[in-house]
Amino acid sequence: MIPRYVVDFDLHKLPRIDTDVIVIGAGIAGLFTALKSSETQRVLMITKKSLFDSNTRYAQGGIAAVMSDDDSPEFLAQDTLVAGAGLCETAAVDVLVHEGPQGVQELIRYGTMFDEEDGHYALTKEGAHSQRRILHANGDATGYEIVRALAERVKNGSGIELWDDHFVLDLLTEDGECRGALVQKPDGSRVAVFGKATILCTGGTGQLYRYTTNPEVATGDGVAMAYRAGADIRDMEFNQFHPTSLCYPGAPRFLISEAVRGEGAYLRNIRGERFMANYHPQLELAPRDIVARAIVSEMEATNSTYVYIDITHEPPEKIRHRFPTIHEYCLKFGLDMTTDWIPVAPAAHYMMGGVKTDLHGETSIRRLYACGEASSTGVHGANRLASNSLSEAIVFGQRIVDAIAKLPEPPAAAENGPASDRHAVLNGTLIERRLKLQKTMVRYVGLFRDRAGLLKGLEDLKKQLPLFQMNLTKKEELEYANLLTCALLVAEGALHREESRGGHYREDYPQKDDLHWRVHTILQREKGIRTERVDDNV
């Protein structure tokens, strides 16, 4: 049993800070909601490292929004629903496709500079999109440009107090409402922060897996602390593995953007053969889960650890202009994408599930909101459509800010910490524990799953549960506790869902089963696991 709190504490002995809105995390979700909230509220923004350490910073492809006369919200909605494999909430998708363009204009107002061609925004196409609708910046550095613009506003604006290098331990609740958060400072001391609303913008869980495109901060902290607080966690079995990350000796796993295939790149096995025609009629532009599994199948068939992505048939000037970041990064390792095929393999990339929210970003705990990858708004279903994540963050971020503005002041009380007294010290190195967890997830809860493997994975993970009875003080220890929590949630959801759909593939149940499994998986700390129907008005 995962305990309510990850540490012991006594609220009466802790310093207290009061504010209006508490934003936990950075990235586009944290930066945007902090900026918008600060227009009318006092905001405390807490990051465990810095404003520039988030998945958003590394987002290459772009942001999806209907920005041309050739496109329509209905087209984008249809593409989103198809990619989501029957688990999208249509109301959430409708919100995204209609409010996305306004959100993009807000990013522009805050200083984001998207690429232009002939006086118009340059739009590209990515996998499973029927139209060219992806805005990008500096070719393939869209996330970095968005973070740059928003972070400058946060640092230079008024109304936002910024705490870098602080670790949020747990959420503080009372009578089913969130009152704030317990925070550990860089010196190890702790403080209780109270506000009328708390927003989780903590990103995803990429560090569950040994190979990931995510930065080291992606340890699922928000999902874990929301679960401990009693929030509903939805669809954690759906993990998106990006099909094409650089796989080369001496090079870290580096994202080779979806947009490279969108601009015409081919996938080839080590024999030089294009193979996607054997797997899907959309070839290289098939949904990500299909492409990722196709690549693994080709790797196994050819006894290789990678396949190639080949864009050498496109003009070198186009490649260098459109993908300057990828081109320069590959050059560091002696690979020139204008003349060389680039070796790639799948890597953990995005979490479709998360903390369940309504259409205004509120979780099952009143006054607790979730935005960005940490949330499960219902937009992504079983498989996120490329470049929908950035637009989801700004659309639902704005809705969260609007909802918070209407909240009354909360009562001041919050429940105290646990009466237990943890003294045991964690034995063994965290590096070993973390690597073992990642290997368990790759082997048993990765791209291909089955009942026997999931049971073995859960058995191995549950052996680590005594961790929660130990005195955890270091950030790395607390991150590991959150990773273990999320690993258990992913494995439990994957074992429960006896079908294959989107980012979840069961070799023992290879078919999609709409009769029994066109439902969401909900995990809650005290109630366990249950299913909930998809609200699509069908």
Image (cartoon, rainbow, N blue to C red):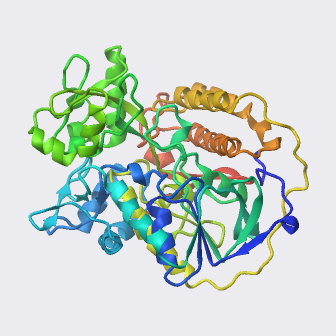
In the rendered image, which quarter contains the N terminus?
A: top right
- Locate residue 24, reporting x and y percent: 59, 62
Disc tally is 0
3 sits to left or right of 378: right
Which of 462 and 437 lies nearest the eye of the viewer?
437
In the rendered image, which quarter contains the C terminus?
A: bottom left
Is residue 488 in view from this perspective? yes
- Locate residue 486, reporting x and y percent: 62, 44
Please give the name of the residue rendered at 40% of the width and 69% of the height, measured from the top-left corner.
395
Q: Is residue 444 above or below residue 369?
A: above
- Locate residue 151, reporting x and y percent: 44, 64
Please give the name of the residue rendered at 25% of the width and 36% of the height, measured from the top-left corner.
280
104 sits to left or right of 537: left
- Locate residue 310, reporting x and y percent: 19, 31
Please give the name of the residue rendered at 80% of the width and 75% of the height, measured from the top-left corner.
413
Q: Quadrant of residue 306?
A: top left
Is residue 177 in view from this perspective? no
Which of 185 and 401 lies nearest the eye of the viewer?
185
Please give the name of the residue rendered at 21% of the width and 27% of the height, measured from the top-left corner.
341
Q: Quadrant of residue 70?
A: bottom left
Which of 75 and 51 lies nearest the eye of the viewer?
51
Q: Quadrant of residue 181?
A: bottom right
